[in-house]
Image: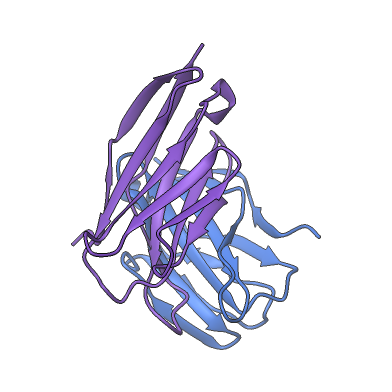
């Protein structure tokens, strides 16, 4: 049973546009929600993360919006650039004391000039 | 710091062969794990370890074996390779208290 549902599977955005990737979860014990960015042939790298007591976190052009009541969180990439073209994974940590992350299935983002 | 180092980067095996994927980290991370990545399936946890001498199964452990004799190393053994094990394998580590994962660059395995 997939515990973190990610959408869309793929996304094409014009340069300068806003990319939005959504994730939903069911387990209310999740206590940390990171996003990972993966370029072809590379391992995933931590992009930005949020804890459930915060509704929004912004780092440069990347913003996480978190809706605890709806059990949803999303990644917004402002002013998307061709260099942002990558696969993005959302994840959730399985509660206090746990190290385990449950990952979404990924979104392949293509930013076209 | 090298971070998380995986070897080899590419490997082709014949069905039934065994092999070990190596993972080493130099950050003194307590937690180490192995994931496999398949198209449309995301990252699925195979095995993990919360310290030397301690290992446990993840979501897809069948056909794989692990051990953790030192903090630095966490090898993944394929006992008898099957075509279904064709995948990209990632090792990841995290410090005590959890500080996010550091991933290796992956091993692309093909079983023919």
What hue represents chain A?
purple
The count of marks equals: 0
**Res A23 seen here:** yes
The answer to whether A96 is drawn above or below residue A6 in the figure is below
Q: Residue A16 or A26: which is nearer the viewer?
A: A16
**Res B81 seen here:** no
Q: Is residue B90 left or right of residue B4?
A: left
The image quadrant that residue A20 belongs to is: top left
Q: Residue at x 63, y 49 (%)?
A: B8
Q: Residue at x 63, y 63 (%)?
A: B23
The image quadrant that residue A101 belongs to is: bottom left
Q: Residue B56 or A69: which is nearer the viewer?
A: A69
What hue represents chain B?
blue
The answer to whether A77 is drawn above or below residue A100 in the figure is above
Residue A6: where, in percent of width, then height? 29, 46
Q: Residue at x 35, y 65 (%)?
A: B63
The quarter of the picture where the C terminus of chain B appears is: top left
The answer to whether A96 is drawn above or below residue A2 in the figure is below
The colour scheme applied to this rendered structure is: by chain
Q: Residue B88 or A3: which is nearer the viewer?
A: A3
Residue A68: where, in percent of width, then height? 29, 64
Residue A94: where, in percent of width, then height? 37, 74
Q: Residue at x 42, y 47 (%)?
A: A89
- Taking the view exactly as shown, the residue that stands out farthest to the left is A1
The quarter of the picture where the N terminus of chain B appears is: bottom right
- Taking the view exactly as shown, the residue that stands out farthest to the right is B1
- Taking the view exactly as shown, the residue that stands out farthest to the top is A113
Q: Residue A17 or B7: which is nearer the viewer?
A: A17
- Taking the view exactly as shown, the residue that stands out farthest to the front is A55
Q: Is residue A109 left or right of residue B84?
A: right
Residue B102: where, in percent of width, then height? 61, 60
């Amino acid at each position: 049973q997939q515990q973190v549902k990610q959408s869309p599977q793929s996304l094409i955005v014009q340069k300068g546009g806003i990319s939005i990737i959504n994730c939903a979860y069911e387990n209310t014990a999740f206590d940390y929600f990171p996003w990972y960015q993966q370029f072809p042939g590379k391992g995933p790298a931590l992009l930005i993360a949020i804890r459930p007591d915060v509704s929004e976190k912004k780092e440069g052009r990347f913003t996480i919006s978190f809706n605890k009541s709806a059990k949803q969180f999303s990644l917004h990439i402002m002013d998307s650039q061709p260099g942002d073209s990558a696969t993005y994974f959302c994840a959730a940590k399985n509660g206090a004391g746990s190290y385990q992350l449950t990952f979404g299935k990924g979104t392949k983002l293509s930013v076209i000039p | 710091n090298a971070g998380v180092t995986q070897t080899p980067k590419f490997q082709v095996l014949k069905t039934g062969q065994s092999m070990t994927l190596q993972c080493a980290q130099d950050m003194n991370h307590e937690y180490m794990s192995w994931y496999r990545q398949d198209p449309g399936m995301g990252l699925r946890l195979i095995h993990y370890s919360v310290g030397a001498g301690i290992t446990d199964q993840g979501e897809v452990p069948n056909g794989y074996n692990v051990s953790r004799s030192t903090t630095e190393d966490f090898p993944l053994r394929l006992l008898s390779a099957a075509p279904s094990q064709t995948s990209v394998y990632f090792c990841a580590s995290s410090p005590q208290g959890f500080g996010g994962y550091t991933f290796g660059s992956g091993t692309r395995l093909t079983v023919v």
